[in-house]
Each structure stands twice: as structure tokens, then as C-alpha cells.
Image (cartoon, grey):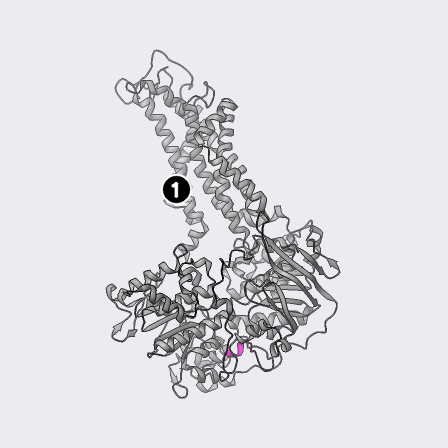
Amino acid sequence: MIRRLTFNLAPGRILGIVGESGAGKTMIGRVIAHALPAGFAVTGGSLRLDDDNLVRLTPARRRALLGRDIAFVPQEPMTALNPVMTIGAQFSEHLKRLGITSRRTRALELLDAVHLRDGAALLRRYPHQLSGGMCQRVLIAMAFAGRPRVIVADEPTTALDVTIQARIVQLMAELQRNAGTAMLFITHDLRLASRICDEIVVLYAGRAVERGPAASLLAEPAHPYTRSLQLASPTMTGPRRALLALAHRMPGLLELAGMSGCRFAPRCPIAEADCLTMDPLDRAAGPMRVAACLRVDGAHRIAVSGLPVAPAIASGKPVLRLHDASKRFRSFWGATGTWAVHDASLVIGAGEFVGLVGESGSGKSTVARLIMGLERATSGRVVLGDRDVTRASAADARHRLHWAQMVFQDPQSALNPRRMVGDIVTQVLQAGRRPLDRTRRMERARELLAEVGLGADLLERYPAQLSGGQRQRVNIARALCAVPRLLVADEIVSGLDVSVQAQLLALLLRLRAERGIALLFISHDLSVVRHLCERVLVMHRGDIVEQGPTETVFASPRHPYTRRLLAAVPPDDPALPWQPFPDEAELMPPAGPPRAAVAVPSR
Amino acid sequence: MNALLSGRVLVGAALILFVSLCAMFAPLLASHDPGEQDLLNILLPPAWSSGGDAAFPLGTDSLGRDQFARLLYGARLALLVAVTAACGAAVLGTVLAHIAGYFGGFLDWLIGRAVEVWMSFPPVILSLILMVGLGTGADRVVLAIVLVDWTRFCRVLRAEVLVTTQRDYVTAARLSGFTHLQTLIREILPATLPLLITLLSLEMGIAVIVEAILSFVGLGVAADQVAWGQMIADARSNFALAPWTLLLPMAAIFFTVTGFNLLGDGLRRTLDVRQTIARSA
């Protein structure tokens, strides 16, 4: 899986391990933790922490080292804490294991260091009474408790909201500086890594393709893959440009066995014949820089030009209008309620791409569900085309088929694992009073797959046999089947790697050019919204707090919440300072159990 | 498909097949009518032991009836009750489970409370009370088992339906214009079917036992029908004299129930999606 990986981590430094899913990032953490999945083994090499070879440790020595000298910050803070024990009890247990006396005082000190106020009250709480960000702070405090020599943080902020992510990353960097600890920061986000890491290793298919100081690596990538990653990510400043969409995908574990030569060569824009046969060795690529490429100097030749889209289509007749739509969720016996969406008004014209941004729990998804008739508005109106569909009746649903369709966030959950792709994409034709026969449906399925850039050979596959990107395309193809005028897309690229994301964004833009389709694009990723949408709406706690042309809103945000969202994104230019705002909710534990009334509609 | 052929499934299926063949060909295999009394030959031991008679391969009971014939005809009743009662309970429980899990809200609350109240009665007592009210007969036994055991299906399947309903593909089906009924049959039932099949098999074993209990206390089938429970009840008083009269029907029950349980347990392991995924990953 991983081959010939070399890195050095000095005390007080942060090393970033960057790669897409399947690159082998997590394996590194697992090797250190001695938690390799069945069937994997370290076949050679060593991993030294001072005098200990971490690959071959006696169990006793391992127990002594792990948790004490090597601490871990997990990916999912909510699941890493025991839900039936108070924070205090878990903290105390951890400190006891580290051999620390006066545990309460130490715990309070540590909580203070991670900027959690009122630690004494916090210690009495249970994990479910805290937000995800607070849980992660607690876990970070625990990780630093034993003054470890190394901290391994595997995607520590991926499960958190953007504004919280920014604060957590800065907090970790701050603690690490103060304690002089070394840190291994594993992430998929090159931009984030370049912000906090001193040095970065870029992994591709288990091979470290490039290594070097963070700033120079980002400014001048030497390996074609690093360069491609950068060109595939949308930016927050400067003119909008097309994204580089690499062909194919990263070779999987089974394909690797049969590969000789450079593992990136089949996708590399500047590969030549010898790349496919010769295994590139690490070469110097500038001061302190190493890249495993035969054409170290060629990376800068990779470029994309042109605008992402034909100029925005002038808004025609509105396809969707929301007038003061509100949704209130009541508890079962109707005692209390929460406004998930409050007086939301928006208009989307034909062929218009509109972004909807906000944090989790801001009501973005509820807006989508209101439009799709999955929830009925408590008040206000939802108008699709020329028909008021607020009541979400059966006739409304038939009308909606040809006006709005939804693309779901998680393609895994959105595709029935027991159905073949051909049946999934044409299920609209199977429903209703006059279902089409199978031959006619397969004809249509072939058209749809071609439209989303998939081959007809996938017709008889099951979702489990597809890659993440292919599944999301199938998901889009299904939504297109009834030829809707509006697509409602809820976080459809958030689980995907940047190179796949770039392909999908290009697909959406092509669909607009060809069919004039409109899009409501719900996302937490501001740079993707900027790339795709002319107009953006910002939601905060059920209210649309700001809306306008994307460039204007992002360049001069008026609402304080929009400013906070924007500040949470690290600037494109590594030279510019990154100053996310402190989040009051993070600093002050709310009085009651905060997530008792969170709007999670049952259906 | 190969995964289906685990050891448990094979052994369980073989046992059930054997009992089914016995039941099916009972008139051909048995040389006596199961009700025929031969008062000259009462409590005969099996043919192979001393004092046995080749005409009565497994001996006779206290009224001189052929044990072999009675076991075979008893299997007919046991299997008939097991299959129909389990299917009946499955249909009732599955329908209610899907309604509760899919629609949620008040319906879910109502069905959930009904199941809880129902399950708070001890099942044996409940079925005895029902039998007293309904009267005896094979159809009444089936009805009693259905009315008592539908809750097993309802409770377990509801949880499965609930999980499946929250998947996005179910929402997608609704957005594609399928009716609730179509969505349930198309998207949700296939996901719950493996669990349903497993429960069905286990329930058949339970039904065999319940039928035996009811026959044992005389509240099962009519006196002229042969039931294993009845055979045990008849043999009680002569246990010291003729232990085989008691042991044979007990062994029959044991093998049948074991067969159903092995089959059910094996199916649970092979059909359970989560376990299959865990194995292949």
C-alpha cells in the first residue's frame, strides 16, 4: 500500500501529510498506533521516535509510549468520547493513566488552555451536551495532557463546521508552539495544511510524491500531482478560472500491484512514454524540496485557462419562488417548537445557479426539503414555475417532477444497493400510472448516463461496484430523468476529493450550457460556491441573513455572520494572514443542554 | 448464493426436509391408522428390543396405538401449524411494522404501545386464555399463535424499516413519483426481507413448541387428531413402565425445533447485510 515513505519530524514542528482518499494517509496513523487493519503489515523500514523503533515494539513498551509520548486527536470527536461518562470522569481516567496527581486542577488548567470557559461546569457534562467543536477541544486538551513528544491528528476538523474548523486548527497550532510538541497533521486539504504545517508530504496512491517546506511547496509545486491538486481547487480571490479536471481516478489497492513506473503517470498531463515504465526516484527540486518525478521542472507547464462557464445566462422567468416560507418543528405532543427556517424568501430564475451557504443546523437542508415538498411550510408560500406547491399535495408532486429534482449529499445512501444503475436512473419512468417498459427505459438510461459522462457499460452494475464520483453522477442522472428545470443539490461534492469535485462542477456547468437548467447549490464550501454560482444566500439559524451577487457578497460582506464565515476560509495567498473570528458559542458553554431541540425531522 | 450454504443452514434444512417428507408420506409409511386401537398390544416396546413386535416398529401406547404412525401424523399437524401460524404472524407483524416504521408519528406511537402492552402478557398464558375463548382445533391453534406472536415480527422489523426509511434513496423514490405503497414494496421491503425470512424460520420453531404445549394441556386440537403434545400427555402416567412413549414425541419436537432454529440462525448470519459487509470488507 505505502511504499518508501520517508519523513523526519523535529520537536516543535508540524508535518502535514496531504492526500486524497485512498492515498494511504490514515495508514500512517495506524502504523504508529499499531492498529493496522487485518491483512496489512509493515514489510520493511523503520519508524523511529528517538531511540524506539515504533514498528517493532514490545507490547509493554508500546503501552508505555502510546497515549503518553504519542497522543492522538481523532477525526470524529463526538464518537471518540464515551457517551455515558461525564467529561470529568473521562478526563480523570486519562490523567490517572498518565500518572498525574491533583487531577482536577490539572484538568481545569488544560481546559483553560483550549479556551473552554467555566471548566468546572464542563467537567460535569456528558459528551452529548457539548457541540462537536467543544468535544474536539476536550480531546485536544486530553492529547496535550501528558506533554507528549508527538501528536498524531488524523483529519481533526473534517467533521466540524468551517468556522469551528478554523479555530480548532489555530488552537492546535498554538498549543503545539507553546508545548514544543511535534505534530503529524493528516488532512486532505492542501490549503489548510499549508497554513499550519512547517513541512508537507504529498501522498498519491501510497507513494510520497513530493516533500518540502509548506510555503514553497504551495507557491511552486514541483510534482505534477501537487500542481494538479492546486489547479483543481476553486479559489476565493482573483478571477474565476476553469478547474483542472484530471481524467480517471487514483489506482486502488488491487490495481497497484500490476503497475510499474510512476503511479500518477496514467493521469499526468505531462507524462511521456518513459513515465509508464520507469519508477521515478526522489529528486531534488529546489532548496529542501524533493519530488518523485522524472520531469521535476515540468509541473509549471500544467495550466488551465479560460472561464469556467459561458457568461451567466440572463435570468429568465423564475422557476422557483419562496415567499416568507417558514418551517417550525414541533415535538411530538406539540409543546415546544423550533423554527428551522424563518421567513425565507428567494427567487431562482431559469438557468441561474444560486448558492446557499451556512453551517450545519442553519436550516439549509430544510429549505431544500420545503422546495421538494418533503416538509410542508408552516407559513409562507412555495411556488414552482406557475404553480403554488405549498400544500405538497399529490397533484403538486406530479407537477414538481418536471420542475424540481433533488441530488442528495451522500451517494452511498442515495442509491438503493439492491438495484442496478439502469433501473435507478430511470425510476421516474417506472413510477406513475403508465410505467414504461424496460427496453424503453434502458434506452433512456443510456442517454442519461451519456449526459453525465458515464459509459453504457455501467447500466447493469450495482452501486457498490461504482466509485464515489461515479455514484454521484448516477445520482445526478436520476435527477435529470424527468427533465426538471431546477436541481436542488444538497452538499453534493462535500464528500468527494478535489479532482472528482472538479469533474462534477464541470458537469453541472455543462448541463446549464446545454439545457439551461437552474441550480440551488447548498454547500458549506465558499470557494466552490464562488466558482459555480452567480448569486449566493447566507443562512444563519433559520434566517437568510444576506443575499446578493457572489462576488459582491464575498468581497464586501455586510452581515457579521457572513464576515465570520469568510474569515474562516484560509486566504489563497499564503503570505496573507489568516484571522478567523472567535466564535462566542465555542467559548461559552450554553446554559442548557444545547442540542435538545435541534431540528432533525424524522422524515 | 454460496454464502447461503453454511453448515447451519444445511443441517437445519436437512432436518426440516426429513420431517417434511415424513409428514407428506405418512399414509404410505405407516402400516397402521394412527387412531387404531389394539388393546391386546398395549405399551409394546420398539421392535428391536425384547418383547417388541415387528408390526409396531416403535411400539404402542397405552391404548395400543402404533407410535410410529402417530409420530408421522403428528408431524403433519406440527408442520401445518408451524408454517401457517408463522406466516400469519409474519404477515400481520410485517404489515404493522412497515406502517409504523415508514409513516412514523402517531401511527408509530400507537402500534408501538400496542406491541408493548401485548408483550407484557406472558405468551403462554395469553395463548391459553385465547384457546379457552376460541375453542379447540388446528385452525384455532394457528389463530392463537398469530395473535400472540405477531409482536415479535413487528418489534424487530420496525427498527429495520426505520433505518431504511431514513436512507436517501427512499426519499428519492418518493420524489420520483412513487406512491407510499410502491415505495414500501420497491425500496423498503427488499431491505427488510432477509430479516423477515430469518424471523420466519425461528418463529416456525416456536410455533411447534406452542402447539405442543397447547396439545399437552388439552387445549390444542380435537381429541381425534394426533399431536405430539397429546402423545406426551398420554404417556405421562406410564413413564416408568414405557419411557419410550414419552421420549419419542419429545425427540420429534426436539429435532424439528432444532432444525428450524439452526436454519434461522444460519440464515441470520448469511443474509444479514451488515455481517456480509463486515466479512467482505
Q: Is residue A179 above or below residue A543?
A: below
Magenta stretch containing residue A506, yes or no?
A: no
Residue drawn at the location 38% of the way across and 74% of the way down: A184
Residue corresponding to mark 1: B10
Q: Which residues are magenta?
A: A230-240
Identity of the amino acid at label 1? Leu
Residue drawn at the location 51% of the way across and 26% of the way down: B140
Q: How many marks?
A: 1
**Pointer 1 local density, CA inside 10 Å: few below 14, some 14–19, many at least 20:** some
Locate residue A264: give its quadrant. Answer: bottom left
The secondary structure type at the circle numbered 1 is helix
Residue A367 location, x and y as percent? 63, 61
**In the shown orientation, is residue A92 left or right of residue A465?**
left
Regarding residue A222, the answer to whether it shows in the image is: no
Q: The disc numbered 1 marks a residue on which chain?
A: B
Regarding residue A293, the answer to whether it shows in the image is: yes
**In the shown orientation, is residue B90 left or right of residue A329?**
left
Q: Is residue B6 above or below residue A246?
A: above
Residue B19 location, x and y as percent? 41, 32
Q: Nearer the viewer, residue B22 or B214?
A: B214
Residue A98 location, x and y as percent? 29, 65
Residue A223 location, x and y as percent? 45, 81
Locate residue A337: give its quadrant. Answer: bottom right
Q: Nearer the viewer, residue A219 or A280?
A: A219
**In the shown orientation, is residue A217 left or right of residue A449?**
left
